[in-house]
Image (tube, rainbow, N blue to C red):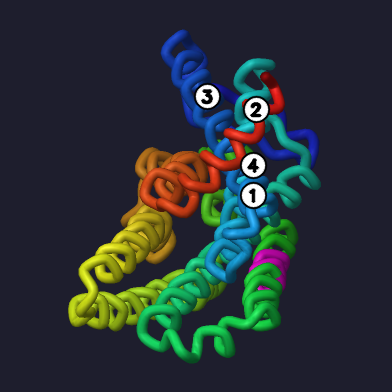
Amino acid sequence: METWNQTSDDFILLGLFPSNQTGLLLLFLIIFIFFLASVGNSAMIHLIRLDPRLHTPMYFLLSQLSLMDLMYISTTVPKMAFNFLSGQKGISFLGCGVQSFFFLTMACSEGLLLSSMAYDRYVAICHPLHYPIRMSKMMCVKMILGSWILGSINSLAHTVYALHLPYCRSRAINYFFCDVPAMLPLACVDTWVYEYMVFVSTSLFLLFPFLGITASYGRVLFAVYHMRSKEGRKKAFTTCSTHLTVVTFYYAPFVYTYLRPRNLRSPAEDKILAVFYTILTPMLNPIIYSLRNKEVLGAMTREFGIFFAKKQ
């Protein structure tokens, strides 16, 4: 069994893959996914900024989702890849705090942003005449700022608490990034009160928004079903199914991981689920929104058409 030098306050990330050729191949796959996610989300942000037809509340919110996904995956993968390729497993005390803060901020903010996107579709389909008022530019900005601010405050509280815990056991975190629940077993004090607070926080930022999203889309699908126009019904159903796909990919593994008691969780299972919502979801979101959205595909054709014309 490996032993670690505990002479400093630094932590050790045991990582996701074994240090062999199989692990190296899997790491290259993760790096390729990181590249796709970076290009896809950057292209989505650039596309929405350039194309005037996409200057609507829905796409403004979508551009923020892409920004969050870009920051989300950049919080974990580069450090994981560096540690594996360099043979080092350490992360400084401050670096662990920064990584934990940005991860939790993106996780909470994205959950709130997805609920704002669901509300946008609810108003657009169920109350179209009120849409310009309920989803005005100012309201859209308030939703986005609210997501970022609330996510940051919640993240700061959790990160500060976790870093102030006394760690008298091994400082080796059995994870591939600094996630607070993975750090708690290393503490030498009883953390049941804090674990309860994690449960409450997860409910507030993930479970309740998810229930709100489900209720919103239930109303939307009911309204879509009773639409007279087949074309309008198809367009509304396609948009909502796209959003629901993204919501399911994001919320399901997150809620399953964080709402279970510690005695029902295993590090191996948590790692697999974490890969899904920290690495795969940021890569899948721009693909889902582009391939299933005619407006985005049309904007890509227009912008890339201009690009190729200039190149020629």
Q: Amino acid at mark 3?
A: Phe
The residue mark sitting in front, 4 or 3, is 4
Q: CA distance from mark 3 to mark 2?
A: 29 Å
Percent from the top left, x then y, of residue 194? Answer: 56, 70
Pointers 3 and 1 in contact (CB under 8 A)? no
Percent from the top left, x then y, of residue 268? Answer: 38, 38
Q: CA distance from mark 3 to mark 1?
A: 20 Å
Of the numbered discs 2 and 1, the one sitting upstream in the chain is 1
The residue wearing badge 2 is 309
Quadrant assignment, res 236: bottom left
Label 2 CA crowd tier, 10 Å (few <14, some 14–19, many 20+) = few
Q: Amino acid at mark 2?
A: Ala
Disc number for residue 268 = none
The residue mark sitting in front, 3 or 2, is 2
The residue wearing badge 3 is 32
Q: CA distance from mark 4 to mark 3?
A: 15 Å
Q: Which of 189/103 is in front? A: 103
Percent from the top left, x then y, of residue 158? Answer: 65, 65
- Which range is magenta? 149-156
* Disc 4 secondary structure class: helix
Of the numbered discs 3 and 1, the one sitting upstream in the chain is 3
* Disc 2 secondary structure class: helix
Q: Amino acid at mark 1?
A: Ile
Of the numbered discs 3 and 2, the one sitting upstream in the chain is 3
Quadrant assignment, res 224: bottom left
Pointers 1 and 4 in contact (CB under 8 A)? yes
The residue wearing badge 4 is 42
Label 1 CA crowd tier, 10 Å (few <14, some 14–19, many 20+) = some
